[in-house]
Amino acid sequence: MAFDQDIICHGIPSINNGPWIQELLNNNIILTDVSQTFDPIDILIGADVLGKLMTGRLHNLECGMTAIETRLDWTLMGKKPTLNYSENDAALIVTSMYVQEADISNFWSLGVIGITDPIETKSKKLAEQEICERFRETVVINNDKRYEVCLPWKENHPQLESNKEIAQRRLQITTDKLKKQGLYEEYDQVLMKWLDEGIIERVPVDEENSWGHYLPHRHVLKINSTTRLRPVFDASAKSKNGISLNQCLETGPNLIELIPSMLLRFREKEIGVISDIEKAFWQISVTPKDRNVLRFLWWKNDVIEVLRHSRVVFGVTSSSFILAATVKLHLELLSKEDKFKDMLTSIIKLISSFYVDNCVTSVDSLKELHQFKEESTLLMAEGGFNFRSHKIFDPIGFACPVLLLPKLLLQKINTLKWDIEVPQEIKEDFEKWYHQLKLLEEVKVPRWISSTHKTERQTSFHVFVDASQVAYAAVIYMRTQTDTDTKIQLIAAKSRVSPNKKMTIPRLELLAATIGARLMKSVLETMVYDQQEIYFWSDSTTVLTWIQQERQWATFVWNRVQEIRKITNIECWRYVRGVWNPADLPSRGCTTSHLIESKWWEGPDWLYNSEE
């Protein structure tokens, strides 16, 4: 399958005028895309369904091409005859490929964060590591004592063409809107301020007619923001060959995958800390040889002038990766310097706590907070980054059972044709779900997952797994016991829609056990606990038998059992009655009001009891 490819097929030019057009008209055949444009492809139709679109009518033209009627209208196939062949000539080549049906449950790829197949994770990490290593080799410190980077170009990326005409049209549209809204002068002042600060620069007059790629821009107005009016640049704007700058650049690792781990660290200790880098992207310079793909147009005395970015541009697909990789490189370099060896603890904490320009972590005391704030500010300043710190409390996501319902509704309507209205029953279910979401604002969840320090408590993790015919789920609670009290806190939860192909409940229960084992492994890799008790709970005696007995089960069962046995202790797996299993709720889904009434995030009542 090609869902992971940025480009499957480049743009195809429209059919231009020639004697074949008149021949088509004479036969009452009208083509809708006869022009000189070069538009990107909107939809690719697989060879497995192409035959269903053909009506059977065709007409062989004298020039050698063939007009074929489809249910979408007439199309032209073949090579246009000409003495001067152009690489932009339109032609159609049909290649038969078998593509398996896409499972709709794959569309929520973010839902598998922390529970991804280890083999898939390993190959992905190797590719990401290679991208990072190539990028790090290009980073230097320039004469302004600022980190300077090359854009992370994809290997064998498609050719990027000049799109100045498109940028000129977009400039006029933006200018008209700014003047209509009375914002033109303010917008101009923002750009002139950037020019003074070296964020952008003018392209020398003698270079204006040289090759360059342009980023169209528009304004965004936020009345209550500290930055009221700001330009936004479109690096997805395509040139005539259908290629954009974003398609040519690496995006690096998926930074969203870091969020669960960071939120766990944020809840781990008594005081939560969030810090950020002021104007982070603008602190990193772009090497001069790459700046001509970051050009844009603006006005000077009512005449268009050419400018370009000299710093990393917010809105370019690789920018978050560039910032994250540069910050990590900076901290790793500091860790090797003797003068910062006393701050090594803060350096390690910073390396593991950054999400783009935000540092999210937690500390055990006010003394540690003040030390981290002081040292982190100094460390980041060494790289030209202004680090701002403050204390904050914030809950994490806990609505896993509620979020299952829209996925199930989407699975139901996936079999409908695109032009058929959604059934009234499904429409009403969705609207009811949507309007109840606001009730979540009433819920308050403690940020700190414990109420005492490590030396004063006994900690255990409890992983519950369950499945229904529609979904399977895993939930992790942390149980903290002191001499006077017992606390239960939700640590992590995941639910997955069952595959479209019907499976037996025991096999779905095994899938739940698998993601439970993976999720616990992910938590342990994030949270620092020297000793902890771990319990895995399932209400399926069949699954417990599969895990605890070393036998040659069927392939589906065998593969998952071997993974579970590898990353968990089989003696930790225990039976729980179905009515006592809190994973039942996310495996079936529920309304927001039901979730609030259940106080699901507080764990089952029986878990507060002593083991006796």
Image (cartoon, rainbow, N blue to C red):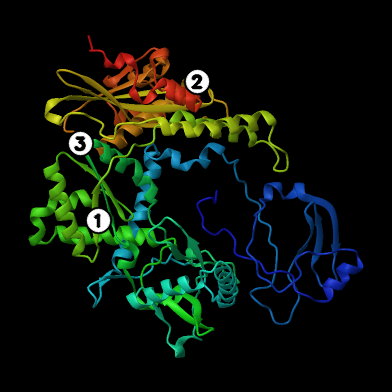
Q: Are marks 1 and 3 in contact (CB under 8 Å)?
A: no
Image check: 606 left or right of 342? right
**Can you identify the residue that label 3 sits on?**
270
- Alpha carbon separation for disc pair 3 and 2: 41 Å
Q: Amino acid at mark 3?
A: Glu
Name the residue: 48% across, 63% down: 246
Element marked by disc 2:
helix
Please report whichever mark, 1 or 3, sits nearer to the chain's N-terminal start.
3
Name the residue: 36% across, 54% down: 128
**Picture quadrant where residue 416 is located:** top right
How far from the left and from the top, in percent, is residue 11? 62, 65
Q: Are marks 1 and 2 in contact (CB under 8 Å)?
A: no
**Can you identify the residue that label 2 sits on?**
505
- Alpha carbon separation for disc pair 1 and 3: 20 Å
Image check: 209 left or right of 266? right
Above or below, 606 against 366 in this view is: above
**Can you identify the residue that label 1 sits on?**
388
**Picture quadrant where residue 42 is located:** bottom right
How far from the left and from the top, in percent, is residue 263? 31, 40
> Which part of the image, by quadrant, shows the C terminus?
top left
Q: How many numbered discs, if any?
A: 3
Residue 550 visible? The answer is: no
Above or below, 176 against 102 in this view is: below
